[in-house]
Image: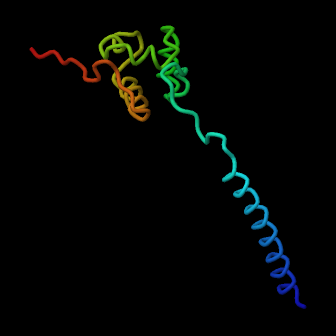
Amino acid sequence: MSFMEARITDLERQIRNHSVLLEGKTERASTSHEPTSTPHSDSDPIENLNLRNRTRNCLLRHEITTIQQVTRMRWDELYELRGMGLRLMDDLQNALAARGLALIDSEPKVETK
């Protein structure tokens, strides 16, 4: 048996062992009755929104710590927070939309002159 044939045989054995291990894991996972993901809650901390650091820090600086607090605010209230600009507002609204949530009035009021 050449080196290459021995190596191929060894790799085939390793693949069989791994496939047996994987089959066992998938059987255990399918029989498990535990929930695979936790449902989203408005009372979750804002860290669960996966915001940019700057957006999260701005909210925390103003003692806004839960998603529920954010969703109970109007767009203009949030925009008036020190450090909260359009880019941060977009980040926040996109993160909320990804969870099926929105601000009370998700559209900014634009003043016309």
Judge from the rendering whether residue 102 lies leftward or rightward of residue 62; answer left or right.
Answer: left
Choose top left, top right, bottom left or bottom right for residue 87. Answer: top left
Residue 41 x, y percent position in the rendering: 50, 25
Judge from the rendering whether residue 60 lies leftward or rightward of residue 6; answer left or right.
Answer: left
Choose top left, top right, bottom left or bottom right for residue 26. Answer: bottom right
Instruction: Give the vertical position of 18 relative to 108 (above or below).
Output: below
* Residue at far left of view: 113
Residue 54 x, y percent position in the rendering: 49, 22
Instruction: Give the vertical position of 75 relative to 38 (above or below).
Output: above
Residue 63 x, y percent position in the rendering: 51, 8
**Quadrant housing the C terminus:** top left
Judge from the rendering whether residue 104 lies leftward or rightward of residue 99; answer left or right.
Answer: left
**Quadrant housing the N terminus:** bottom right
**Residue, x 41% and y 26% (percent of image)?**
92
Instruction: Give the vertical position of 83 relative to 38 (above or below).
Output: above
**Number of numbered discs overlaid on the protein picture:** 0
**Residue, x 50% and y 28% (percent of image)?**
49
Residue 6 x, y percent position in the rendering: 87, 83
